[in-house]
Image: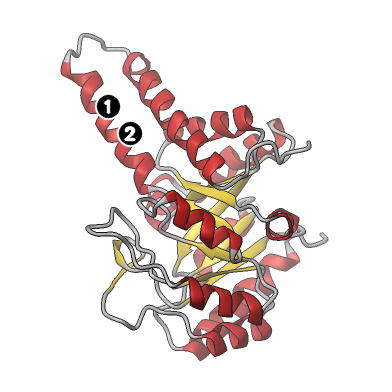
Amino acid sequence: MNRYKNHVLEHADRQGYATPAFNYSDIWEYEAIVQAAIEERAVVYTATNMRVAETIGLPYLGALGAKAYEQTGGQILNHLDHSRSVELCKQAVDCGYHSVMIDASMCSLEENIEKTCEVVEYAHKHGVVVEAEIGRILGRNVEGTYQGEDYLVQVEDAVRLAQKTHVDSLAIGIGTAHGFYKEKPNINIERLQQVNAAIDTPLVLHGGTGVPFDTVRACIQNGMAKVNFGTQLHATYIDTLKKELTDYQETDIAAFMIPVRSAIQSVVQSLIQVCGAENRFDG
């Protein structure tokens, strides 16, 4: 099989917009993302973190992603997010994922390169693209907890990892965090510019929730070709569900989940527009 071309992020990089990735936890969140993408005529990634992947199971999630990809003509790309496990990445490839992320950012640079190379070698044989991470994403999440000043990506490390691994995209630590921010995030645009000038690999911004939209757009203008969102969707899910359950009268779960799905879809559509990804799908 020929390697799946990383044309989505390469196109975004050339055209000055970003392809958004949305983390989902269940079918209602997933459907909201898909319908938003269809409405906005945007290519998007539907992403699962390790906890969701291990709880629901990669065979189910892989089948879900394959069906959405088929039905939309390639508009929805299935992505494994922040996997610390090389084997989990390989399993996702075997289950039909279009994209996998090996996150060895907590390891030494040499170990990060080694693990990324192993995933790249396996994934590319099966037509799957690979994302890696260098530097660290702040905050507390299933992917890890990082504090202090050691989060910032070093340009020479990004260059070495990109050159040694031939990875398809690279998430870099520039001050973003998973979860909600307790104060205004301090995003290092200058470091982003330096990395973007040093390598041709499309760059990825994690921790998009809570970053001011103007800052997100500035990151995109300076090289971010993919932006990840999750917490804002999950919070919308929970808040809307709480409201629907206040006057609970139904035993039909769909009766109160449909408004939840609608609320999430609205959020996703607005974030697609923030990334400038609307009306980019020509399938």
**Colouring used for the render:** secondary structure
Q: Is residue 201 above or below residue 47?
A: below
- On the picture, is 19 further left or further right than 58? right
175 or 99, which lies in front?
175
Q: Residue at x 37, y 20 (%)?
A: 259
Q: Quadrant of residue 27?
A: top left
Q: Is residue 137 above or below residue 233?
A: below
- On the picture, is 20 further left or further right than 142? right
User: Does residue 131 appear in this view?
Assistant: yes
Residue on which disc 2 sits: 237
Amino acid type for the residue under numbered disc 1: Leu
Q: Residue at x 57, y 74 (%)?
A: 193
248 or 35, which lies in front?
35
Residue on which disc 1 sits: 241
Q: How far is disc 1 from disc 2 in space, using C-alphas?
A: 6 Å
Q: Position of residue 239 (x, y in %)?
A: 25, 32
Q: Position of residue 4 (x, y in %)?
A: 76, 58
Under circle 2, the secondary element is helix
Instruction: For the residues labelled 1 and 2, say whether their Cβ atoms are less than 8 Å apart.
Output: yes
Q: Position of residue 199 (x, y in %)?
A: 66, 79
Q: Quadrant of residue 264?
A: top left
Under circle 1, the secondary element is helix
Image quadrant where one finds the N terminus: bottom right
Image quadrant where one finds the C terminus: top right
Q: Position of residue 25 (x, y in %)?
A: 40, 42
Q: Residue at x 32, y 35 (%)?
A: 236
Q: Residue furthest top?
A: 249
Amino acid type for the residue under numbered disc 2: Tyr
- As drawn, the label of residue 139 is none
